[in-house]
Amino acid sequence: MKGRNVLLFVFVLLLNLHIVPFASAQSSPSTSEHIIVFGGPNWEFVVQNKLTELKAALIKDIGPQLLRKYAFLTIINVSSVEFNKNLRVHVTVLQALLSKGPSSRLLHLWPPDEANSMITQGEFSNTLALHPGPERATVISVQLAEKETGSIISDEFLLRLFKLGYTILALMAVLLFIVLVWMCCQGCGSKPVEEGAEPYPVN
């Protein structure tokens, strides 16, 4: 009976040790960075003349997807806006628990990928309405900033790998050409053996 009580005590202790780090992790703020790309030829005019309105419209569109009143503090910040063929917006999202009571461990802070998924579900009607016609503006992509950076690094690595492969093939081709030329020169330079003549002196 004592053995069972000891095992039960150890089990409860391990369970509490597992819950405490989880609760502390949940109580710490969560930050994520997102890149939103909009298509449309006239975004440059909006960036130059209506930048403040554009940022306000972005926050107004993203807010309903992420805000959870009374449980979480959610801060949405438009870090940068730039136009290069498309409108590219860098958004930072901060989430933090409003309550640190015993029930706070039951609340779920969205990880970056989940927050990104929630942003993707938005229609961005206020933002798209700022784009002057007649062409229609669209949302091209919503992705995590770290994934975009990772894809750029991956593309650069593949490009360098291809360049290295082409360089090796070119060097091998040059080396093969040199060997063939050397073999031809050796063949042309050797004298043919006359008939009836001994190729080697006989003692």
Image: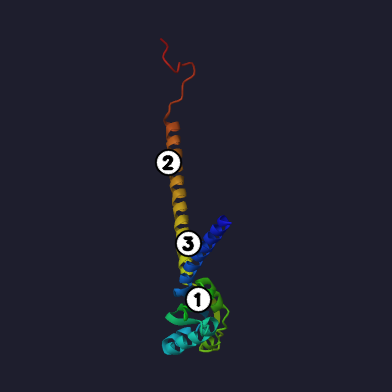
Residue appearing at x 44%, y 39% in the figure: 179
Q: Which residue is mark 3?
A: 154
Q: Could you give the CA–CA distance between mark 3 and mark 2, rounded to whole angstroms? A: 36 Å
Q: Neighbour class for label 1 at 10 Å: few (<14), some, many (≥20)?
A: few
Residue at mark 1 to residue at mark 3: CA–CA distance: 44 Å
Q: Are marks 3 and 2 in contact (CB under 8 Å)?
A: no
Considering only vertical position in the picture, is 165 above or below 25?
above
**What kind of element bears circle 1?**
helix
- How many numbered discs, if any? 3
Q: Mark 1 is on which residue type?
A: Pro
Most extreme residue toward the front is 1
**Residue 6 on image: x %, y %:** 53, 58
Residue holding disc 2: 178
Indicate the amino acid at tag 3: Ser
Question: For this rendering, which residue is in front, 6 or 194?
Answer: 6
State which tag comes first along the sequence, 3 or 2: 3
Alpha carbon distance from label 1 to label 2: 79 Å
Residue 85 - label: none
> Would you identify the image quadrant in which residue 92 lies?
bottom left
Q: Nearer the viewer, mark 1 or mark 2?
A: 1
Residue 94, image quadrant = bottom left
**Residue 102 shows which numbered tag?**
1
- Mark 1 or mark 3: name the one nearer the start of the chain: 1
Q: Earlier in the sequence, mark 1 or mark 2?
A: 1
Amino acid type, residue under disc 2 in the picture = Ile
- Residue 192 position, x and y percent, is 46, 25
The x and y percentages for residue 63 are 51, 84
SS for tag 3? helix
